[in-house]
Amino acid sequence: MRKFLLFGLLIFLSITALACDNSGTTTTSTTTTTTTITDTSSMTSTTDDVTFVTTTSADVSNVSVMGYSSNGSSLFEPNLSISDWDPSTSTVTNITVSENMTFQSFYGTGAAMTQSSAYVISQSPDRDEIIDYLFSENGLHIQLVRLTVGASDFVTSEVGHYTYDDTQGNVPDTELAHFSLEKDAQIISVLQDALEINPNIVFIAAPWSAPAWMKTSKSLYGGSLYSFYFDEYAAYLVRYLEEMDALGIHIKYLSVQNEPYHSAYDYPGMVWTTAQTITFIRDHLGPQIVASGLQTGVMIWDHNTVDNSGVLIDFPVKVLENESAASFINSVGVHCYSGNEYDMVDYLNYLHENNPEVEVFMTECTAITTYKAIESNMEWSIRRMYLEAYNRFASGTTYWNIVLDPEGTVHLGGCGNCTGLLSVPIDGSSGFVLEADGYITGHFNKDILSGSKKIYVKSSSTTLLSTGFVDEFGKITIVLFNDGAEKTTTVHWRDHTFTVTLPRNSLTTLYWNYSQEGN
């Protein structure tokens, strides 16, 4: 461990030296190097290609720093106390920022547009205002949305549990003649309106179950996929991709299965082994996606970090050991429902050490209605699903339901007390309430474009967590979580510093725009 820390320190000192040109002139060069990194905030452990863009100290007098902060008593509060830039050489620095070192792409944060979410949005008299708030730059500016391929536990009782090819008496429909997205009508309508507001939304889709006639249980609940229906199920999933694409909804990541190690008795689910997953992707799903011409990658795992004994689950690493299957896989999904924040850190490090070329997403987590305290919920989620995850190569986060009613009652089986990013009444009244993870979502979306690169941001305080990004236009955004009393923090960038006062127990976003060609 000491050698990793020493190596990380040497890299940081090298970057600092590269960033300073004592002649006072501005020079720009680009090099690519290979180093060993696991935590991009402290730079310790696994091989990864990292791009260094060497830039010198420059005049930042015209670069304005802006930001906003949220905690239990305020939402996106813009009246922060931020000082002017100081060219001081003071060594008292709490946060160090360098865009000279870039890491993984970041696609934003968001949540799942379940059938329940679409229903709750659609029945509200404020439907259009809610969609605008969720997806516009004036609202949360959600850029990453997860979809259920068929039903999950979050459907209305009127719609019920379904797939897109359910047949009377489970009669096989190998030609998919009865395939229909009809029960997704509300979801599709909301998504199309969302895309009018933000056409750059990235979509992840995950099935809960194959049609019952394809399964060993002859039911949407439990069981596994018959191997002799692998080809038909691949065709079923590709048909979903094609029909959604024709509706203007392009799925960038298709998960093979939501929670393949979990089989519920009261909502759809299906169990997969690593061997089944390898065969299905290698011989059926992967080739059929390629043949379709769709630019969709395969996501695997989409489940928790550790088993009941606290042991890291090796499912995705084992699948990726098969090179033929791995050639179709571009991502791994991770859920929050087991272990603690340290297990999550260990798991993301484990995934990156074994497969640094594969993107990782935090694809599901939820708060519950019986525990809604903003500050404590923010801290819990930030450490497991957001800020700490991005420092360990995660490319985005999707919470569970994007919208639910205040008591989480619109569901059929499964979770009976889940919350959404927004709570919207279902009694015909107007309005909505932003929940804790809605606050966090806004902080990671409002000023960070999808496709931005994670950059080096380092905090010297254990009560101040930090991460940061740079977009293609030179806008640098850092997000800070102050897990303690109000404090004045010094931020160092390009031989200049500024100070900002962070409210107690707050999440703060700061941003400034500086390009190599000028302000």
Image: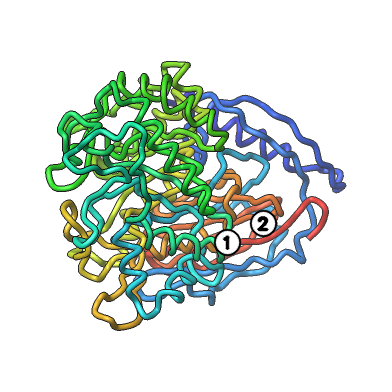
* Farthest left residue in view: 265
Q: Is residue 36 above or below residue 180?
A: above
Q: Amino acid at mark 1?
A: Asp
Coordinates of residue 205 in the picture (x, y in percent): 40, 45
Does the rendering let one see residue 227?
yes
Residue at point 69%, 60% (across, down): 513
The disc, 1 or 2, on the residue closer to the chain's N-terminal end is 1
Q: Amino acid at mark 2?
A: Lys
Residue at point 19%, 65% (across, down): 409
On the picture, is 507 further left or further right than 347?
right
Residue at point 39%, 64% (across, down): 438
Q: Which residue is mark 1?
A: 447
Check residue 232 in the rendering and tell me which mark sits there, or answer none. none
Q: Secondary structure at mark 1?
A: loop
Coordinates of residue 276 in the picture (x, y in percent): 30, 22
Q: Is residue 415 above or below residue 340?
A: below
Mark 2 surroundings: few (<14), some (14-19) or many (≥20) residues within 10 A: some
Q: Residues at badges 1 and 2 in contact (C-beta under 8 Å)?
A: yes
Q: CA distance from mark 1 to mark 2?
A: 9 Å
Q: Is residue 73 above or below residue 477?
A: below
On the picture, is 33 further left or further right than 322?
right
Q: Which residue is mark 2?
A: 475
Coordinates of residue 96 in the picture (x, y in percent): 58, 49
Q: Closest to the observer: 134 or 369?
A: 134
